[in-house]
Image (cartoon, helix red, strand yellow):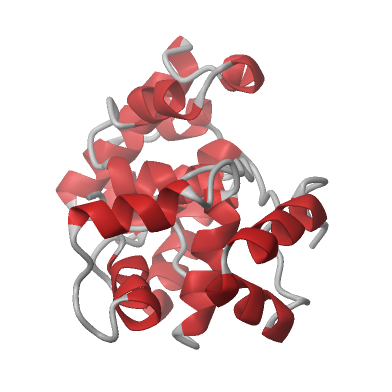
């Protein structure tokens, strides 16, 4: 995976301003975040994987790709619900995947505009899709778009890491939480990555169930 161009600058800045992150960055120098794959497929796969095991999600996804022939918005819109159900999707997930496809086909989700849009505007586009919540959108911005300054505070792994690294196992008060995370800007995605690594959890969170 190719790291974003900002990765080295981000890690240097974070190490300089936060001794906790400095130690983590020194320990995990090889770990990087990079852009991953087609946007529609990434989001569709996130919907497919909601509330089922990784193994089951992989199986359903493989059957869905085989049924659709090619994983594009047009192909999903051309498939009837029975076909999607036969691939292993629930009625609700079939509706979610087709709603996602409609948003892409209609231009309501416009990938071409994303380089000019801020994070919150893209998140607002994504959560208009049934089955995609803010957490999923934030994971997408971090892992697919490689946006550098996303802070997914609702993520349970990040919450736990903040408690362990800054609160001696106890939740941080809002003032302390704001002070710690404000210092990470404009590299909060990178800081979040190292917070996850501090838990030694594998795999790192990927786009999944809506928040």
Instruction: Relative to 174, say whether 132 is above or below.
Output: above
Residue 36's x, y, as percent?
66, 51
Q: Foreground residue, 64 or 182?
A: 182
In percent of the image, x 30 and y 29: which residue is there? 99
Q: Tell me residue 21's x, y (percent).
A: 58, 71
- Residue at 41% in and 58% down: 180
Vertical relation: 79 (above or below) 183? above
Q: Is residue 95 visible?
A: yes
Is 168 situated above or below 20?
below
In this rendering, position of residue 32 left or right of residue 148: right
Q: Residue at x 58, y 41 (%)?
A: 186
Identify the image quadrant of the N terminus.
bottom right
Image mark count: 0
Tell me where residue 18 sits by quadrant.
Answer: bottom right
Residue 33 x/y as whole percent: 67, 59
Decide if residue 66 is on the left or right side of residue 159.
Answer: right
Question: Which sits in the foreground, 173 or 51?
Answer: 173
Residue 78 vs residue 27, the one in the foreground: 27
> Where 50 falls versus 80 (above or below)?
below
Residue 100, x across and y down, in percent = 37, 31
Whether residue 154 is visible: no
């Amino acid at each position: 995976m190719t790291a974003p161009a900002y990765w080295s600058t981000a890690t240097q800045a974070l190490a300089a301003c936060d001794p906790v992150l400095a130690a983590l960055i020194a320990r995990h120098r090889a770990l990087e975040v990079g852009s991953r794959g087609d946007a529609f497929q990434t989001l569709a796969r996130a919907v497919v994987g909601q509330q089922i095991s990784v193994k089951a999600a992989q199986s359903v996804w493989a059957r869905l790709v085989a049924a659709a022939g090619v994983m594009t918005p047009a192909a999903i819109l051309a498939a009837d619900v029975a076909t999607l159900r036969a691939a292993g999707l629930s009625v609700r997930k079939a509706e979610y995947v087709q709603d996602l496809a409609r948003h892409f086909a209609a231009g309501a989700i416009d990938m071409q505009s994303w380089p000019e849009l801020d994070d919150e505007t893209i998140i607002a586009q994504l959560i208009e899709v049934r089955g995609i919540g803010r957490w999923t959108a934030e994971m997408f911005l971090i892992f697919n778009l490689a946006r550098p300054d996303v802070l997914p505070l609702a993520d349970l792994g990040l919450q736990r890491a903040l408690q362990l690294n800054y609160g001696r196992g106890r939740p941080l008060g809002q003032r302390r939480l704001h002070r710690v995370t404000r210092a990470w800007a404009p590299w909060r995605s990178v800081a979040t990555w190292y917070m996850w690594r501090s838990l030694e959890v594998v795999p790192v969170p990927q786009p999944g169930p809506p928040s």
